[in-house]
Amino acid sequence: MRNWLLPEYIEDVLPAEAARIEQLRRRLLDLFRSHGYQLVIPPLMEYVESLMTGTGHDLDLATFKVVDQLTGRLMGVRADITPQTARIDAHMLNAQGVSRLCYAGSVARTQPDGLAQTREPLQVGAELYGHAGVESDIEIQRLLVKALQAAGVQDLHIDFSHVGIFGSLIGQGRVSDALEQQLYGVLQSKDQSALRALAVDLDADTREALCSLTELNGDISVLDAAARRLPASAEISQALQDLRQIGEQIASLGVQVSFDLAELRGYHYHSGTVFAAYAQGYAGPLALGGRYDEVGLAFGRARPATGFSLDMRGLVTALPPAVLARGIVAPQGIDAALLLKIDQLRAAGEIVIQELPGHAEHRAELDCDRELVLGEQGWQVVQIAAAGNAAAVL
């Protein structure tokens, strides 16, 4: 086996793409900071009990596990940073009011997923803890819209749902845990005939309401239809009201908004509104998020929570090919005036590469379109002349 081969779905990021991803990462973290979100850097590995706590079994199969050579305990390589931020909020910061956290780092998945189909996504996200109202959901979703627009994504479309609606129907129908899992599965495929067969022993109101979920998808008028077709319980009414308020707020940003009340992504993890962002040119969701109020309880301190995350590698898949910025090549030397000019150019944001002896024949590989030359007025930047053309002083 060749030593330079990488495992399946693990890849290098080469200079042009790496530069673009890093610039975008900085831009997003600066955006989050301007909104009061503080950066945290959780560890790459933790004991599996901590990584899995509060997320059900959703991350179990996605997590690489290793034995800690110091303690003999089982550790996991994080597959998602969100549970780590919940732990930090619950135990490390111990804030009593609202806390806003953001992060950017690699995660590892046992199977490839996402737009980039990689097992090493670069996850960026923002989480808000300590507020249970719809206002914090709207804040997070508005921040997501700004983040994607800052990345150059156009024609955004966000799809919303609310897992509390399904949860309310399950409670109303006194559905067993085993049947709940089966109903959840067929709802994701919107198989109404299979749903009716599974719900045959439930009361008629619950059965019809569950079947209605498969048809309740579309624009904001879906919420009016849901109010007519679903039980008028306090929980469902509140969920529909929250979705309406969120939809109106996000639509005001010029974003296309839709609703799919059968979408239960992360049902065992989320506790309220869930959403996914889409855009033209992308084959799947750019970002996922929602409310997950129950996660903090597993860390000993229940805290309302809402947030989103996206994969930077997936985000750039539909953008034009990355191109490296061109630089200025400077001659080798220790002349004080030359070194001062190089420092001034670098301080101004220019890329300046000082040549090393013996590599003149490989100068084109430096990818520079200008050079520093010594003229009558000192060191000056000139355009590198094409064959047959004179160099121009810049």
Image (spheres, rainbow, N blue to C red):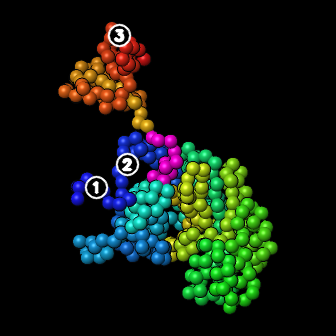
Residue picked out by circle 2: 13
Residue at image mark 3: 377
Above or below, 332 relative to 272: above
* Disc 3, SS: loop
Kind of residue sitting beneath label 2: Val
Distance between mark 2 and mark 1 Cα atoms: 14 Å
Q: Tell me the element at label 2.
A: loop
Under mark 3, the amino acid is Gln
Instruction: Write down the quadrant of residue 122 in the picture.
Output: bottom left
Which range of residues does the magenta coloring cover?
312-322
What residue lies at 36% left-to-right and 57% top-to-bottom?
10
Mark 2 and mark 1 lie on one chain; the one further toward the N terminus is 1
Residue topped by disc 1: 5
On whether residue 317 falls in the magenta region, the answer is yes
Above or below residue 40? Residue 230 is: below
- CA separation, marks 1 and 3? 52 Å
Location of the N terminus by quadrant is bottom left
Q: Is residue 197 magenta?
A: no
